[in-house]
Structure formats: structure tokens, C-alpha cells
Amino acid sequence: MKIINLQVLSMVLSRLSKREKAILYGTVLVVSLTAIDRLIINPIFSKMEALNKQIQEKDAGIKKDLRILAQKERILAEKVKYASFLSSSASEEEEMTSILKEVEALAGKSSVYLVDMKPVGLKKSGSSEKYLINVNCEAQMEQLTEFIYNIESSNKLLSVEKCQINPKSKDSSVVKCSMSIAKIVVK
């Protein structure tokens, strides 16, 4: 490659007319500005745009985290409120004993005579466990209705799965009831 000699360049420029010099200088100016734009300015603005986008994403994440932190006290209060529904460290036998005691207390509260109570077992499904017991009892219909209501509204997540009611005798106002009661424990 030959190095352009300044004397040759000045000789070529001196031969150009005034109009040709203006066009040459204008072309050099446009090419120089385009080169500066493509090599310096455009990369700087692209980098700034990318950084601004990252800042906006981080800002949105921070705002979301601040909303969660602002609700921290409410979330902790809700956790305490529902802690009894979550799995405890009690063993299967302890949990079953707790259910049997709860059902016995609810029966006593409703004046229902418990004939028989048997634990059926434990069914696991996903992140929950279901403890089942079978109960045979005798009571007046009003007392039995109150008993079932107390089971369903218990704060231990008890529910009546199956219930079969029959009269104790032909002319008696007392009914015999056989039901399955379940307690759901969330892990």
C-alpha cells in the first residue's frame, strides 16, 4: 500500500475548481459524520438504552418486593391464624388421638351418646393428609344436627364424609347414626 503523499494531495486539491472543492469537503464531512455516528455515538446510545431497560426491570422488581414487605405484618398475622391447619410435628397416633378427643368433646357438647368410635386410618394425597374415623352414635334428631354442625364448623378442619341415620326403634324419637369423619392436615 502506498502512503498518500501530502504534496500529491495538495496538488490534486489545487487543480479542483471551487465547486468541486465544496462537493469534496461536503462529502468528506458527511462520511466523517456517518462514521462517527456508527462507530461512537450509536454504540453509546445502544448501551444506554440497554442499561435503562435493565434499570426499569430492577425498579419494577424492587417495587414488587416493597409491596410484599409492606404487607409483612398482615402475612405473619395470617400465618399465625392458619397455623393450626398446617401439619404439626405430632405423630400419626398423636394426631388420631387429638381427633378422637375433639369428636368426643363435640359429642358431649351436643348431648350425643357415642356408641363406638374407631380410627380408620390415614390417606395421603399430594401435600395433604386425611385422617379418617368412624363414629356410631345415638341422639335426638336436634342433638344430632347440632353435633354434625359442630363437627363441620370445628376449627380443626373436621368434616362429615358419610352419614347414615336410622330410627332406633319404630316409635322412638331417638335415631342411630353411623358416620365417617375426616380431618385434613395440610403439609
Image (cartoon, rainbow, N blue to C red):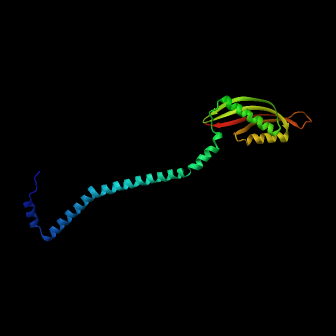
Going 53% across and 52% down the picture, which residue do you hit?
A: 67
Residue 100, horizontal then vertical, whole percent: 74, 32
Residue 82 in picture, x, y percent from top left = 64, 43
From the viewer's perspective, tell me whether residue 146 is left or right of residue 3.
right
At 77% from the left edge and 42% from the top edge, which residue is drawn? 149
Instruction: Residue 161: name its quadrant.
Output: top right
Residue at 83% over, 40% down:
143
Q: How many numbered circles does the render carry?
A: 0
* Image quadrant in which the C terminus is located: top right
Q: Is residue 172 left or right of residue 94?
A: right
**Residue placed most toward the observer, 102 or 32:** 102
Residue ID at (10%, 54%):
3
Q: Residue furthest right?
A: 171
116 to 57, vertically: above or below: above
Foreground pick, 125 / 184: 184
Measured from the top left, where is residue 71 in percent x and y?
Answer: 56, 51
Q: Position of residue 135 (x, y in %)?
A: 77, 32
Give whichever of 16, 49 is nearer the camera. 49
Looking at the image, residue 182 sits to the left or right of residue 77; the answer is right
In this rendering, would 168 be left or right of 101? right
Q: Image quarter for residue 186?
A: top right
